[in-house]
Image: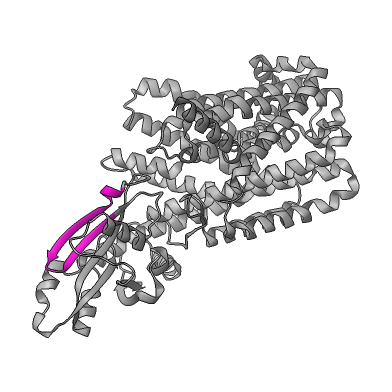
Amino acid sequence: MENSNNKRTLTLSLGALGVVYGDLGTSPLYALQQTLSGEAITRETVFGVLSLVFWSLILVISTSYVSVFLRADNEGEGGVLALLSLLKRYVNKFPRWLFLTGIVGAGLLLGDGMITPAISVISAIEGLKVISPDFSHLIWPISFAILLALFLCQRFGTAKISFIFGPILLCWFIIIGILGAIAIFHHPGVLSAINPYYALAFIYHGGWHAYLMLGGVFLVITGAEAMYADLGHFGRNPIRIGWFAVALPALLLNYFGQGANLLQSPGAITNSFYTLSPDWFSYPLLIIATVATIIASQAVITASFSLARQAILLNICPRLSIIHTSEEETGQVYVPQINFVIAVGTLSLVMIFKSSDGLAAAFGMAVNLVMLIVAILVMCVARQNWKWSISKIFLVFFLVILIDLAFLGANLHKIQQGAWIPLAFAVVISVIMITWQKGVELLRSSFYMKKIPLPDIIKQLDNTKLNYLENLTTIFITDSYDNSGGSFFNYIKLNRILPEQVLIVSIVIENYPYVPEKKCYELTELTKGIYTLILHYGFMQSTNIPRTLALGGKMKVFPFTLDVNKATFLVEIINISMTKKKYPRLFYWQKKLFGFLLRNSAFDIEFFRLPYNRTIAIGTYSEI
């Protein structure tokens, strides 16, 4: 049994390399070059920057994320929205500012999903320029074509090829580690930069200019947020093993190798990564670097889909079509609208900036803010959930917050250089999420909760005027806040028919990632043949109502025989009209935006995966 567990842990650790560390692992392609570009390559400068790189990886990744942040999981799941859900379970009155902070963090992560693929792939293809300057004009068109193909392939999923991501990234880490080690062998004195004295001396003597260079140093830790967000896919130990056993040693060897190479050949700053390689290895390195950045981009895109699904299920995002690309892995999802938006953003950035130099100026700000938000949320978890004292929180988080703020200050100047683009995107996403969440609250309070209660409606039914349909089960899908069980009983009165079995189903998404099957069903009998059923799902689960009902039938949840394949489903489609009535914290323009989002969100039929040929949609109207 122990051998089996060890084998599983190693397998997961290998898988984590291909997903969790794709972004971090491809940072050597551009991070050091962007930091030192335009600087005088002196011993003090190289040693100072390398010391900053070393201690950033140790203090931010190894200490903060691996040692502390990975503990803040929501039953194994990580990420900004998982943290929000975790805090909601332990805080009686959830602060509005904390909710808004999480929303902004989610928007920033989606913004990061646009720029990461662009800078990663372009940095890899820029190896062509090192091979021959004549290839320079091909860099951005090839990058554009690769990314376009990547986004077009998303609808097919990655279930069949994802198992090779880990081995490929393992080869990548081994290669970049060996290249760095060879350079260090020729200039071993560069290892002295591990001493923090060089970092402090560099900042002290370099002043404001040296401090601004921290914006470049920050690029070595971009991707740390993915480590935490992908916690649920692999678990703590595999992520930690992958970091300390493979990723960290390889990254340090390569960064220090680049530094050693620059000290020997200052002209190598034109591309400090590719100049590490001997000429005969240039083309193979270019190929594997390109493949590694494609995998890293795929991981970021997949994370965006997962984040969108969480936001939709937690009702802070309009319903979008969620397509499951794998029957075995529930986490393998494809969200066409998100894919389109990220694709347009990424490809536009490639066409606008056309080089890693331009993209590096725009990169980092969004990630920096996400990391600061994650630190704040984890600090709240430490206080509310772990019951840490204020003094302990201060000791643990003071340095973490200080480092994040220091990097943030160094990145602020990037706003005018292009960092405003992912920030603006994050603002738009945040406004949409906040408007949707407030709009749903208004719709529930002004429409659903003011309806006649369901028991009173049942009493109004004149049984003598109804035609009973034997052996027919009708399933009404309604909102959990709807007192009347939807407008479906009006449909019954109009048609004067009553099925033998009526099941009124509503959905509740819990602040847990997964809800056990036995706790999923909450059945109540209202009167003979009429039942209400509340289905409880976690925010990481698929809301496939027919499949859940079929499973409930096998588990004998219902006091009657339920054949889902013969049942008729009814859903309610709400059309709203806006008024200028005052509503707290919701402006008229937000009502208009909410109406637009509601009209263009996915119908219940496709969102709950209902059968088209046995589903009836009923339209109703509401004024807000």
Quadrant for residue 597, please give it.
Answer: bottom left
> Eyeballing the image, is 493 above or below 442?
below
Q: Residue drawn at (14%, 83%), measured in percent from left and top?
A: 466
Q: Residue drawn at (73%, 57%), measured in percent from left and top?
A: 145
Quadrant for residue 388, please give it.
Answer: top left
Quadrant for residue 256, please give it.
Answer: top right
Which quadrant: the N terminus?
Answer: top left
Depth check: 514 or 481 in front?
514
Q: Is residue 206 toward the left or the right of residue 1 in the image?
A: right
Q: Does 518 appear in magenta? A: yes
Q: Is residue 316 visible?
A: no
* Residue 83 on image: x %, y %: 40, 40
Q: Is residue 71 toward the left or the right of residue 272 in the image?
A: left
* Residue 392 on image: x %, y %: 38, 20
Identify the image's colour scheme: rainbow, by chain, secondary structure or one colour. Answer: one colour
Query: What is the chief secondary structure element of the magenta stretch?
Result: strand
Q: Is residue 553 visible?
A: yes
* Residue 545 on image: x %, y %: 34, 61
* Residue 239 on image: x %, y %: 53, 32
Q: Residue drawn at (79%, 44%), measured in percent from left and top?
A: 126
Q: Residue drawn at (47%, 63%), measured in percent from left and top?
A: 321
- Magenta stretch? 517-535
> Eyeballing the image, is 301 above or below 454?
above
> Eyeballing the image, is 610 above or below 508?
below
Which quadrant: the C terminus?
Answer: bottom left
Q: How many marks?
A: 0
Q: Does 66 appear in magenta? A: no
